Amino acid sequence: MAVVKANAYGHGLVATASTLTAADAFAVARIEEGVLLREAGITHPIVLLEGVFSGPQLAEAAHRDFELVVHDPSQVALLEAQGRGRRFIVWIKVDTGMNRLGFRPEEFPQALARLCSLPIPPREIRLMTHLARADERDCPMTAEQLARLQSLIDALPVHPAFAGPRGRPVLSIGNSAGLLGWPAARGDWVRPGLALYGVSPFPGELGTDLGLVPAMTLESSVIAMRQVPRGETVGYGGTWRAERNSTIAILAAGYGDGVPRHLRSGAPVLFPTGRGVLAGRVSMDMIAVDVTGLPGVRVGERAILWGATLPVEQVAEYAETIPYELICGVSQRVPLELR
Ligand SMILES: *Cc1c(COP(=O)(O)O)cnc(C)c1O
């Protein structure tokens, strides 16, 4: 299932889902995201990764034919209170160690029993878990989580609501890091998000190292050029000081567009003729870039903040964050252009 939550990680929800027609299903975090997909005419199965939280949401999910993750007893209660309605595909979330969402193995039998005796029984019951440290290739925690899941499955009764082989439930385990790094974590359904967009979930590795193609390029253009004499500062707080007479290009991209405010001076910005570096604090609508000695930079010139030629994984390091936050953070005012 293609994970398209958070506006498809900043790539445009409907545009992305309309492009990923080969996906077997889409996964979203919020019911509103699923509704937008249905309203755009997407007929694929849609999984609500956090399920529903109220009676009206449950009714909407029934109306829109969403699959539900159930991770909390309150969600079982919502299904029990459902008078008439749809037979859902229900994914029971098992907490195998992430300690975020899901039933702990000792709570699982009761949740399963309640779901099996619903007035409107599920069309199918599947199992989902989430890995906490799959992006650490040498960490033993993933194997421990898989072992906990396996012992839970081994103890399950054969049940007609399970549609996997030998009366077992269909499983979904791995996100991008699980899928790429842990073959044992693939299960029946994988849930890649980041990797779909060509970005590496592993620290210190690039999407291209993994054979992926980065999908997003964030571009801006130069709206002013200036010469800054040695010793003067640039931008709010005067945090960057020219160590030489410097040529500064002002780009029309700031934290209002999703350029992180904590991007450090020195972060690379790519022009057609080479790299400039961020000079001073990111403003809401602009950044200043030191392009001293770089030929051909003038008003109207295009520049790349991240993309295929400037890996977002590397830019994220200059903001002390992960590439997820950069691509998800591209704001609504940035026009999307499909290429
Ligand atoms: C966001 C999310 C994913 C996708 O994670 P990536 O690291 O982007 O691949 C998978 N499963 C769940 C439950 C999620 O919330």
Image (cartoon, rainbow, N blue to C red):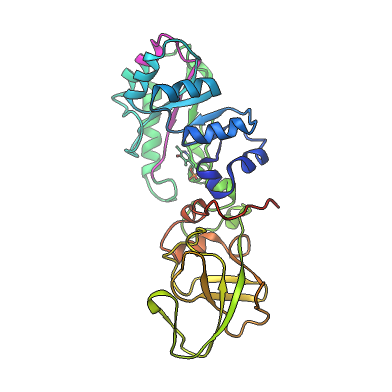
Tell me the residue at 49%/59% (across/down).
256
Tell me the residue at 50%/90% (across/down).
229
Extent of the magenta region:
113-132
Q: Position of residue 260 (x, y in %)?
A: 46, 62
How many numbered discs sit on the rendered protein? 0
The answer to whether residue 24 of the structure is visible from this angle is no
Q: Nearer the viewer, residue 221 or 260?
A: 221
User: Is residue 115 shown in magenta?
Assistant: yes
Q: Residue furthest left?
A: 106
**Quick check: 295 above or below 320?**
below
**Quick check: 335 above or below 18?**
below
Q: Quadrant of the N terminus?
A: top right
User: Is residue 123 shown in magenta?
Assistant: yes
Q: Nearer the viewer, residue 313 or 82?
A: 82
**Quick check: 268 above or below 171?**
below
Q: Position of residue 147 (x, y in %)?
A: 38, 33
Tell me the residue at 50%/15% (across/down).
86
> Which quadrant of the figure has residue 272?
bottom right
Q: Is residue 120 left or right of residue 198?
A: left
Q: Is residue 259 left or right of residue 155?
A: right
Q: Position of residue 204 (x, y in %)?
A: 48, 60
Q: Nearer the viewer, residue 248 or 48?
A: 248
Q: Nearer the viewer, residue 27 or 283?
A: 283
Tell me the residue at 40%/24% (across/down).
153
Q: Position of residue 11 (x, y in %)?
A: 58, 48
The answer to whether residue 254 of the structure is visible from this angle is yes
> Which quadrant of the figure has residue 2?
top right
